[in-house]
Image (spheres, helix red, strand yellow):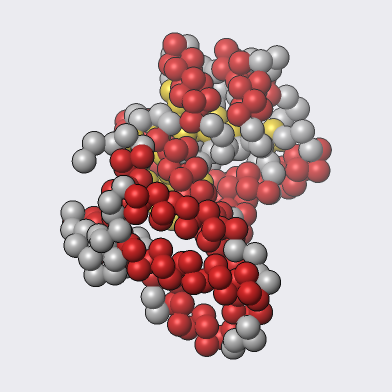
Amino acid sequence: MNVGFIGLGMMGEGMVSNLLKAGHTVKGYDISAAALERHAKAGGIATKSIQEVVKDVDVVMTMLPTGAHVESVLFGKDNAAALMKPGTIVIDSSTILPKTTESIASRLKEMGLAMLDAPVGRTSDHAWSGTLIFMVGGDAAHLEKARPLLEAMGEVVYHCGSNGAGIRSKIINNYMSIVLNVLTAEALTLGDKANLDRETLIKILMGTPAGRSHLATSYPAKVFKGDISPVFMLDLAAKDLGLAIQVGATDGVPLATGAAALQVYTTAQTHGRGREDWTAMLVHMHELAGLKK
């Protein structure tokens, strides 16, 4: 397949390497001359302009820092979309706002072009090894046409729904992962400050939802089944969280994430969820978000 790839940075360069290994023809463009030189040495076609990279290709891929960059490339001074042949599929793997993705998709459709938002999970190491996770939003038929490209770069391709669903899934994944990073650091620091053996503590954590994730343990067993009868009451969870925050205060370990979480637990209690299972937190969040039961 003939591909034009815009953005040969930490992620893009690795992704392109696997497209080339799979036998696809890849024209590349980046503002970095060094990146273009490496692309040419790897077997790709280095181009000097956006206009050149999108000419006569089946698919245009973008991996750029912001939504403004994507819009500028497609509709701004570069006006790349106007130069693409009818039926070209634009695959944007940038992490941008869903409303930007949806707007871009609508504009491209009016021009006779297609779009898939296909942000990735994992890191630049996985980009090089071809083991990314793709979260794709867009028409299923367009995804099937582009699937050989995505499968050359990743080991799992999820079709999340229509345009915008892919980037929404990525943002949710990032939100959970990034917040858990802070929570993990707080918890380990609490143990380190008390001179607990790190290895033993981690073994303990990995044997419970703390380390194994609620998505793999408590949620499937309870709230996902519509069962919020208490195995571990939300009131007790709030009490135990309060104890941890008190220990942190005594030991001089700031637990900002825990303090914020306690406020949410307190709100759930005032809404009558205290005697229910702690996984009823999901029901509480649905109510706050205005979702129907």
Does residue 96 lie above or below 110 as drawn? below
Query: Does 254 sit above or below residue 199?
Result: above
Residue furthest right as drawn: 33
Instruction: Classify 26 as above or below 130.
Output: above
| 254 on left or right of 137 | right
Residue drawn at 44 percent across, 17 percent down: 106
| Residue 46 in which image quadrant | top right
Q: Position of residue 265 (x, y in %)?
A: 41, 55
Identify which residue, 96 or 39, lies in the foreground: 96
Question: How far across and how far down the image is residue 112, in percent?
Answer: 44, 14
**Image quadrant occupied by the C terminus:** top left
- Residue at 24 percent across and 57 percent down: it is 223
Q: Nearer the viewer, residue 79 or 246?
A: 246
Which is more toward the observer, 110 or 200?
A: 200
Q: Measuring 47% from the left and 83% from the top, which residue is drawn there?
A: 203
The picture quadrant where one finds residue 116 is: top left
Is any atom of residue 270 visible in this view?
Answer: yes
Q: Name the outermost residue toward the front.
A: 270
Q: Is residue 151 visible from the viewing direction of this image? A: no
